[in-house]
Image (spheres, rainbow, N blue to C red):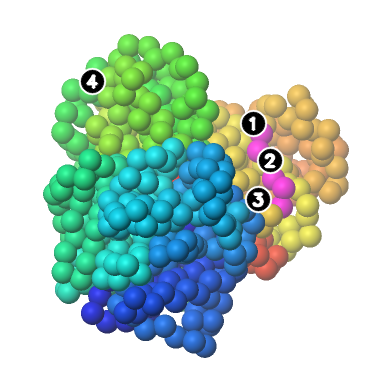
C-alpha cells in the first residue's frame, strides 16, 4: 500500500527520502515520487514503476535541499502512471497522501468551478488545491492543513510542504498511520517505522485526527481545533538489520525459514513447564477471559485463516462457541453479540483498515472486551485493543504472509489453552497440549527439510492454470492458506475446499489437468479424507498428498506424489502442515519468474477499505 517519507534537516534530504522509500517497497506500490524544496524552489521527480526508476531520474538531475516529501503509490483512483504519482502540486503546495478521500468528487467539482485545473485523476489532488487556496487567503501552512482536513471524509495520512514555508513539513492523519522520527537537528515523518529506522529509532506515534508540524528543531502536534498537544517519544525496538534479506533469494524464503525462531520467541516467557504463564494477555486478562462465554474472531486474509484454525482449538479445549468472520463483512453487518462475548482481532500489521474498523465497531456493540493479536507493537490495533498478545515474528517484508501466520497460530494456541484451563479442561489433556505446543518450533524445523523434494514437486506446477486444495477439520483452513499462498505469488488460480464438500460441486472440475493437493494428517478424519481422495483418483486427477509419517495410506496412493512429514501431534499439526504448502507456493512462483516479494496488484499493509 502507499508509503510516505518526509524530512526537514540540515543536510540534503533526498538520499534520506529515497532510502526510506526503499525500506517501504515491501508494502507494494506501482509508482514513486519525491519533491524537495531548496531555498524556496520546488523540484519534483516522479516515475511509474519501481523506486529505482525514480531514483535514476533523480540521479540524472539531483535536487539538493533540506526539506522534502516522498511517496510510493498503490493505485486506487486513477491508473498507475507518472501523472497520477505523488507528490501532487497545486500552486505553492506539494502533497503526498495515503488513504482514500471519499468526498473528493464534489470537492473536485467545486474547485474546478473556482477555476482550479487538475493534472491527475487522483482523489488526493483536491487536498493540495484546498490547502493552496487557503494559503492564498492568508493562512499559514498548518492552519490551511487543519481547515482542509476538517472538510474531508475518508481516511488519510498526508505530508505537505509549501514554497511559502520552506523550512517545515506539516502532516496529518485519520485512519492511516503516520509517525514522527526525532533525529538530531532533524525531524522526519513516515507512514511506517521502517521508513525512518535508518535515521533514528526515536519515534512519536500520532493519534487519530492529529496534525503535526515539523522543523529541524521541533515537532509539535496539534488537535483539529489548533490546540497544541503532547505525544510521547518512544524508542523503537526495530533495527535496520532486521529487514535485511541476508543469504536468501527472497524475503519470503527468509521468512519461511525464520519460523522456528519466530515461534520460539512467540512462546518464550509465555509457556512454562506447567502450562501457560499468568498475565500474558495483559492486565485484567485473567478476569476478562474467565468471564468469556463466546469468542468472536475477526481478521482478513491469512490472519482470517489463523482465526479459523483457532475456532477448532477453542471449541475443543474450552467448549465455548467461536465464530470467525472476515472484517470487511463484519463491520457492515448488524452482528448479534451474545452477553460475555470476547472480540479477538488478528492482524500482522495492526493497520488493516477493515480489521481496525471492526475493532472500533465493537465499542457500540457491547462486547465484554477486545483482544488484539498482532505483530507490530506500535500499531493502531495494539494501541486500541483492551488486551494484546504480540506475535514477535519480527518484520515481515514479503507481501505473502508466512511467519506471521504460524506465530499467530502459536498465540491463538496459547489463548485456546488458557480458555480451556479456565473452563475446566482436564489437567492431563491441558499438559499434553502445552507440551505439544512447546515442541512446535522443532517440528517446523523438520518440515523445512522437505524443501529439496518440494523444489522437484514445484516443477509439476509451473505450467498449471488451476489447483485444488483439500483438507478436513482444522486442516481445512490450512488448505485455504495453501491455496491463498499459491494464487497470490504464482498467479495460478487455486481454490480450497473441505474435502467432504468435493462431491457437492468442485468434483466437476477434476480431470487430468487439475492437480489436487491434500493435507492428510494421521487423525480421526484420515479415513474419510482417503475416501474423498479416491473420488479424485477415479476421475484422473493428479494427487499430491502431504501426509504425516504415521498416516497409513492405501497402496494405490503411493502412485500419487506423497510427501511425508512429522506433524508433532494433532494439536500443533495445522502449523506444521502449513510449512510445505508455503514452500510449494514459493518454489512454484520462483520457477514461474513472478515478483515473489511484491506480487502484482497486492500490498503488504491494506490501510484502505
Ligand atoms: C496473504 C496476506 C494477506 C494479509 C491480509 C491481512 O499472504 O498477507 O491476506 O493476511 O491483508 O493483513 P494483516 O494481517 O496485516 O491484517
Q: Secondary structure at mark 2?
A: strand
Whether pointer 3 and pointer 4 mark residues with C-beta atoms closer than 8 Å, the reply is no
Q: Secondary structure at mark 1?
A: strand
Residues rendered magenta in the picture: 492-498
Q: Nearer the viewer, residue 471 or 429?
A: 471
Mark 3: is the Cβ under 8 angstroms from ligand 1? no
- Residue 297, by quadrant, is top left
Q: Nearer the viewer, residue 282 or 74?
A: 74
| Mark 1 and mark 3: Cα distance apart in space | 18 Å
| Mark 4 and mark 1: Cα distance apart in space | 33 Å
Q: Nearer the viewer, residue 442 or 285?
A: 285
Direction from residue 310 to residue 185 in the image, left or right? left
Location of mark 2 (residue): 495
Nearer the camera: disc 1 or disc 3: 3
| Mark 1 and mark 2: Cα distance apart in space | 10 Å
| Mark 2 and mark 4: Cα distance apart in space | 38 Å
Most distant residue in the top direction: 339
Amino acid at each position: 500500500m502507499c508509503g510516505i517519507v518526509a524530512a526537514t534537516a540540515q543536510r540534503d534530504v533526498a538520499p534520506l527520502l529515497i532510502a526510506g522509500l526503499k525500506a517501504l517497497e515491501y508494502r507494494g506500490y506501482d509508482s514513486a515520487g519525491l519533491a524537495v524544496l531548496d531555498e524556496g524552489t520546488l523540484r519534483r521527480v516522479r516515475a511509474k514503476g519501481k523506486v529505482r526508476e525514480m531514483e535514476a531520474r533523480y540521479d540524472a538531475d539531483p535536487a539538493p535541499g533540506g526539506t522534502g516529501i516522498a511517496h510510493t503509490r498503490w493505485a486506487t483512483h486513477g491508473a498507475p502512471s507518472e501523472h497520477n504519482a505523488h507528490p501532487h502540486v497545486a500552486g505553492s503546495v506539494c502533497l503526498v497522501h495515503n488513504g482514500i478521500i471519499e468526498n473528493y468528487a464534489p470537492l473536485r467539482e467545486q474547485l474546478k468551478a473556482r477555476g482550479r485545473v487538475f493534472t491527475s485523476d487522483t482523489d488526493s489532488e483536491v487536498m493540495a488545491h484546498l490547502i493552496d487556496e487557503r494559503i492564498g487567503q492568508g493562512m499559514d501552512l498548518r492552519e490551511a492543513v487543519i481547515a482542509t482536513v476538517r472538510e474531508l471524509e475518508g481516511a488519510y495520512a498526508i505530508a505537505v510542504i509549501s514554497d511559502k514555508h520552506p523550512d517545515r513539513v506539516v502532516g496529518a492523519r485519520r485512519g492511516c498511520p503516520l509517525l514522527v522520527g526525532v533525529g538530531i537537528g532533524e525531524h522526519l515523518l513516515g507512514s511506517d517505522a521502517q521508513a525512518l529506522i535508518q535515521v533514528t529509532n526515536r519515534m512519536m506515534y500520532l493519534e487519530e485526527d492529529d496534525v503535526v508540524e515539523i522543523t529541524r528543531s521541533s515537532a509539535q502536534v496539534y488537535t483539529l481545533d489548533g490546540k497544541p498537544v503532547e505525544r510521547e517519544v518512544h524508542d523503537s525496538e526495530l533495527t535496520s538489520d532486521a529487514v535485511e534479506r541476508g543469504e536468501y533469494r527472497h524475503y519470503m524464503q527468509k521468512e519461511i525459514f525464520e519460523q522456528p525462531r519466530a515461534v520460539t520467541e512467540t512462546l518464550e516467557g509465555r509457556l512454562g513447564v506447567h502450562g501457560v504463564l499468568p498475565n500474558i494477555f495483559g492486565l485484567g486478562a485473567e478476569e476478562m477471559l474467565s468471564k468469556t462465554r463466546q469468542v468472536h474472531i475477526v481478521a482478513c486474509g491469512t490472519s482470517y485463516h489463523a482465526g479459523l484454525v483457532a475456532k477448532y482449538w477453542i471449541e475443543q479445549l474450552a467448549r465455548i462457541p467461536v465464530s470467525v468472520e472476515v472484517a470487511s463483512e463484519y463491520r457492515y453487518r448488524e452482528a448479534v453479540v451474545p452477553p460475555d462475548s470476547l472480540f479477538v482481532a488478528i492482524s500482522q500489521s495492526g493497520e488493516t483498515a477493515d480489521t481496525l474498523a471492526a475493532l472500533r465497531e465493537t465499542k457500540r456493540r457491547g462486547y465484554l472486551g477486545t483482544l488484539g493479536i498482532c505483530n507490530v507493537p506500535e500499531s493502531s490495533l495494539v494501541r486500541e485493543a483492551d488486551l494484546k498478545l504480540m506475535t514477535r515474528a519480527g518484520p515481515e517484508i514479503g507481501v505473502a504472509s508466512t511467519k506471521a501466520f504460524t506465530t499467530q497460530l502459536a498465540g491463538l494456541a496459547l489463548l485456546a489453552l488458557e480458555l480451556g484451563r479456565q473452563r475446566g479442561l482436564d489437567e492431563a489433556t491441558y499438559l499434553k497440549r502445552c507440551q505439544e505446543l512447546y515442541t512446535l518450533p522443532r517440528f517446523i524445523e523438520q518440515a523445512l527439510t522437505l524443501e529439496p523434494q518440494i523444489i522437484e514437486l514445484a516443477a509439476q506446477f509451473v505450467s498449471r492454470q488451476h489447483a485444488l486444495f483439500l483438507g478436513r477439520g482444522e486442516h481445512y483452513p490450512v488448505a485455504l492458506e495453501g491455496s491463498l499462498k499459491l494464487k497470490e505469488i504464482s498467479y495460478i488460480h487455486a481454490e480450497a475446499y473441505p474435502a467432504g464438500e468435493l462431491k457437492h460441486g468442485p468434483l466437476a472440475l477434476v480431470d487430468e489437468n487439475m492437480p489436487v493437493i491434500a493435507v492428510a494428517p494421521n487423525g480421526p478424519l484420515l479415513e474419510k479424507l482417503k475416501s474423498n481422495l479416491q473420488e479424485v483418483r477415479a476421475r484422473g486427477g493428479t494427487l499430491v498428498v502431504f501426509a504425516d509419517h504415521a498416516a497409513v495410506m492405501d497402496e494405490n496412493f503411493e502412485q500419487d506424489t506423497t510427501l511425508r512429514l512429522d506433524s508433532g501431534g494433532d494439536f500443533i499439526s495445522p502449523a506444521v502442515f502449513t510449512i510445505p504448502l508455503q514452500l510449494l507456493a514459493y518454489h512454484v512462483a520462483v520457477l514461474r519468474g513472478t515478483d515473489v516479494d511484491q506480487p502484482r496488484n497486492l500490498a503488504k499493509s491494506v490501510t484502505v477499505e
